[in-house]
Amino acid sequence: MNKVTRLDYCQFLLVSQTNYTLTYFAEHSTGISHDGVKRYLEEDKLTARLVWENVRGQVVTSEQGYLAFDDTVLDHDTAKKIELVRRQYSGNAHAVIKGIGVVTCVYINPDTDQFWIIDYRIDDPERDGKSKLDHVREMLDNALTDKNLPFRGVLMDSW
């Protein structure tokens, strides 16, 4: 069996459109076991700062750029004891489901028709006391002050 790397896991997250579970990852990877993915996830932490560190050299900025904020619920409806899983509304399922809430910030360059995930937050109001809009505010402030990204507007749907 192969050892799972950060690159393996990140590529899986980028290409998987509907299922982000470690079981799904293992089932669709050659030489990677469910237990190997579990060990990797227990040992490595893919932080928002690390996401930016890995993508910043690839971002092509534009004065016409946009920041897009979106929320999603990673479905874990069968989960029994996953720490971040809670009941919440999923627009995908059009119902309240058990899942992990994530808010993402994407930088969009309309001149080159490219986009990059530049930040994310786990939506966990029971533990951190923050709403999704609090997370958006933090990521927006970070894009302005720390990342110094030029953009002309902010895009997001209503929550």
Image (spheres, rainbow, N blue to C red):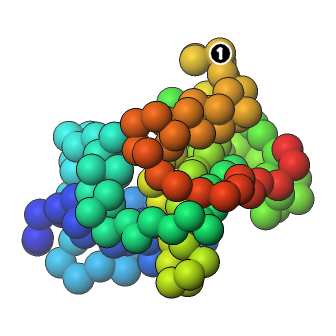
Q: Position of residue 111 (x, y in %)?
A: 56, 81
Residue under pointer 1 = 129
Neighbours of disc 1 within 10 Å: few (<14), some (14-19), many (20+): few
Asked if residue 49 can be seen in this view, the reply is: yes
| In the displayed structure image, the side of residue 74 where residue 42 appears, left or right | left
Q: Residue at x 51, y 30 (%)?
A: 83
Q: Residue at x 45, y 66 (%)?
A: 61
Q: Amino acid under label 1?
A: Gly
| 65 up-or-down from 154: above or below | below
Between 6 and 97, the one lying in front of the other is 6
Say what secondary structure mark 1 lies in: loop
| In the displayed structure image, the side of residue 31 where residue 77 appears, left or right | right
Q: Residue at x 70, y 44 (%)?
A: 98
Q: Position of residue 59 (x, y in %)?
A: 38, 66
| 89 up-or-down from 30: above or below | above
| In the displayed structure image, the side of residue 53 where residue 102 appears, left or right | right
